Amino acid sequence: MGTAVDHMPVLLGEVSDFLRVRKEGVYVDCTQGSGGHSDEILSQLEGTGQLIALDRDQEALDRARERLGSHTRNLQVFHQNFKELPSLLSRLGVGAVDGCLLDLGVSSDQLGSPERGFSFQLEGPIDMRMDTRQETTAAQLLNECSVEELAEIFWRYGEEKAARRIATAIVEHRKSSKFCTTTDLAQVVEKVKGRGPHRIHPATLVFQALRIEVNQELVGLEEFLEQAISLLAPQGRLVVIAFHSLEDRIVKTVFRKAAGKCVCFRPAEFCDCPRVEQVRILTRKPVTPSPQEIESNPRARSAKLRAVEKIETTDN
Ligand SMILES: C[S@@+](CC[C@H](N)C(=O)[O-])C[C@H]1O[C@@H](n2cnc3c(N)ncnc32)[C@H](O)[C@@H]1O
């Protein structure tokens, strides 16, 4: 494994503006990755200021350590799933935080490591685990799930229109040879869908869907965002960057609900939304990268940033 950092932090200036770091505040970077956003937050902390950073990928944390070098006086790092943040904070004796960042999804460094098996462009074992301590790999799913289960994954997490045909071809293929590499899967999908005139590779959505399933990325995200809001100090801010519509929809709905708005969209007399105002929405529309940022970092193109601020009340 190399530790050279390729990942460019997305919407760095915007994250910094929305987090509005106070030099002695307590911040959490839930997805430290290669440390780009952490670096920016740390550069603004002084004295008792703290950054608590988490990632479920040990290789990412190693890269971040290399990037941050001596920049670590105010930093504590944990190899953990951010869904465990509430118990981590209570173990650390931290009652509330001034800011929390989630930069969701996969990093360029993960995509660019063939041995991690995230990319159809690089041949490697089809693994896709962010946390390699976890048992289930993408290869296991491909070799063991039924047609129905695979089709459900590709449809639910990739909105892949050819989900069922691809799932059937996968189960047919594995009768003669098991799935071992990223190329095995890319070729089966390409055979079903053809290359097409499009710029995007035919296996893009299938790879995205499998990755989301392997890492259970959307399971519990809604509950986690609600917990993260409850962990904010008054005027504390939660900033989330999502990279696909399924993720962004969850973020948008949780933020609307926490802002006391209706999320069921039924007529007022039938609406049973809680309508309790815990936060103020800071981004009426999602913030997206500028054309210049997309040009220098094409991976940023699908990023959508949303942010909320905790309202000062006596009962939350
Ligand atoms: C887009 S990258 C973050 C990049 C980072 N902000 C930077 O500037 O380098 C997303 C990171 O989130 C991590 N990740 C995804 N889901 C996670 C989870 N549930 N818990 C902890 N880390 C997670 C991934 O391992 C990956 O390193």
Image: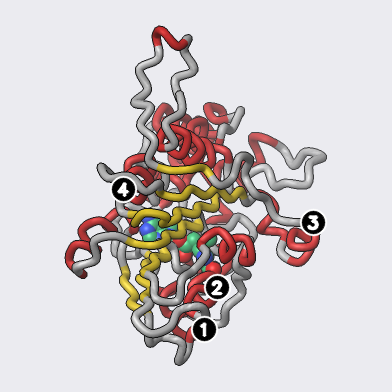
Question: Which of pointers 1 and 4 lies earlier in the amino acid sequence?
Answer: 1
The residues tagged by marks 3 and 2 sit, at their Cα atoms, a distance apart of 20 Å
Mark 4 or 2, closer to the camera:
4
Q: Secondary structure at mark 1?
A: helix
Judged left or right of residue 244, residue 171 is left
Question: Which of pointers 3 and 4 lies earlier in the amino acid sequence?
Answer: 4
Q: Is residue 238 above or below residue 160?
A: below
- Residue placed most toward the observer, 40 or 127: 40
Question: Which of pointers 3 and 2 lies earlier in the amino acid sequence?
Answer: 2
Q: Amino acid at mark 3?
A: Pro
The residues tagged by marks 4 and 2 sit, at their Cα atoms, a distance apart of 26 Å
The yes-or-no answer for disc 2 within 8 Å of ligand 1 is: yes
The residues tagged by marks 1 and 4 sit, at their Cα atoms, a distance apart of 31 Å
Place of residue 193 in the rendered image (x, y in percent of width and height, measured from the top left) = 67, 35
Place of residue 121 in the rendered image (x, y in percent of width and height, measured from the top left) = 64, 59
Q: Which residue is mark 4?
A: 230
Q: Which residue is mark 1?
A: 67
Q: Residue at x 48, y 41 (%)?
A: 251
Q: Which residue is mark 2?
A: 36
Judged left or right of residue 178, residue 6 is right
- Residue placed most toward the observer, 298 or 215: 298
Question: Which of pointers 3 and 1 lies earlier in the amino acid sequence?
Answer: 1
Place of residue 25 in the rendered image (x, y in percent of width and height, measured from the top left) = 39, 71
Q: Residue at x 34, y 43 (%)?
A: 226
The yes-or-no answer for disc 4 within 8 Å of ligand 1 is: no
